[in-house]
Amino acid sequence: MGGKIQSLPGFRDFYPEDCAVRNYVFDHWRSVAHRYNFHEYEGPILEPSELYRKKSGDEILKQLFHFEDRGERSVAMRPELTPSLARMAAARQRDYRKPMRWFGIGQFFRYEKPQKGRAREFYQFNVDILGEPSQAADAELIALAIDLMLDFGFCVDDFVIRISNRDAWIEFMQAETMAPENLSSFLQVIDKMERDNPETTEAKLIDLGTSRQAVDNFISSAAADKHFSAILQNLSARNLLDYVKIDLGVVRGLAYYTGTVFEVFDRGKAMRSVAGGGRYDNLCGLVSNESTTMPACGFAMGDVVITDLIRETKNAHSRLLSHLGSTNSADIHVVIADESRRPEALAVIQQLRQAGYRVDYSMAETKVGKQFSQAEHAKARVAVIIGSEYPSVGIKDLLQRSEVKADVGAMPSLVKTILDSPPEGPLYAQSP
């Protein structure tokens, strides 16, 4: 009686071609994190709802997939990794040397309206430094974010990292004699200034005890330079200053940030935020109910936005396509020209696979011509032909359209020679 079952809104099916793109993103995340000597960790997908309530208040439940489990515990599917990281780090920080350089890649869930660049389930790269109070840690993360964008194929014309600081706004509120308890509400107004109309922003600011003019003057002034000098000197030494901009209009919406905050923005698409993070020195103590705090900072990048941006940016997209072309193909297709030799062919296939090659073949008896068509479809570079003359086999470079005969014992080295040579290069170092 039921109709066709479809996936839920905001949840995605990953067909093989989609998984290939996702893994490409994951590989770059891991590669750059490893270059910076970060160590991978993971937390549970289900956490006590209290973990998120403690961090963000009861309002956060509206953004969560949460329910009561069979043990009558209120649990939630994680919307982010930082609270889990803070819980884990607080529990075992004495077991690790400081600073702790950790990164994670995992799946997350948020109950919000699906739209371009945003889904209800998504993967996210989280990278954090814990136990280092100096702004050298902030600069290290910003440098990592820059290298990550460059690794994807973006250039200085494609993105910028906008850096701000929560402490500068606290000083602004003090100068404006604004009530300290309005900090969270005030930062939310600043965070939405670029999206809200000016009249709405002005009304909210007046209610809080300041004005749009005062805010604009502060953003455009050099009053907060002292908060960024160490970071800028650090990035200057790395020749990375062209990728960053001081912008006090960036405050990040999450309440747990305590100092430097930054976001990676796409220059060409209405300044979309591609990644973001900052310093959160109080969170570990907050989630662990301990009086001691541990300095910490980090940022996160989701797979949905970065994948969209890669596809929309010429150089990054070309790099993706080149990678997919090299990884979505077989190295070798074994052609079984004489079905009676299938056992010998299976032994050859196993030998080649154990040597690390990607090997394909027809599992059912198939005409030779169709097997070569299958090899072409699999984008194989080499065909190894097993026929009635076995142990003599044919070895064909499918790009060069050249073939030699050799004993099966010589086959592995000949195959390696072909696969190691560029498509336009010589077929063999020497003929057998």
Image: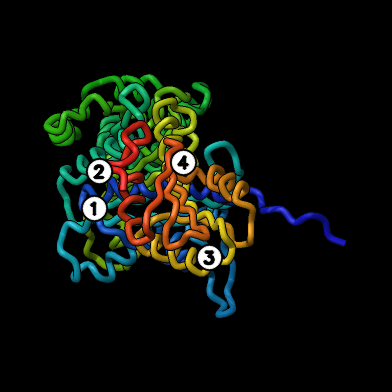
- In primary-sequence order, the first of circles 1 and 2 is 1
Marks 3 and 4 close (CB-CB < 8 Å) = no
Q: Residue at x 25, y 34 (%)?
A: 168
Residue lying at 32% horizontally and 33% vertically, measured from the top left: 425
Is residue 105 in view? yes
Of mark 3 and mark 1, the one earlier in the sequence is: 1
Vertical relation: 121 (above or below) 248: below
In the rendered image, residue 276, in percent from the top left (x then y), is placed at 36, 41
Q: CA distance from mark 1 to mark 2?
A: 8 Å
Q: CA distance from mark 3 to mark 4?
A: 22 Å
Circle 1 is placed at which residue position?
Answer: 129
Which callout, 3 or 2, points to the residue nearer the camera? 3
> In terms of sequence position, does the residue under pointer 3 or pointer 4 come before the other?
3
Q: Are marks 1 and 2 in contact (CB under 8 Å)?
A: yes
Residue 341, numbered label: 3
Q: Residues within 10 Å of mark 4 (few under 14, many from 20)?
A: many
The answer to which image quadrant residue 87 occupies is bottom left
Q: Which residue is mark 2?
A: 141
Q: Is residue 249 left or right of residue 142?
A: right
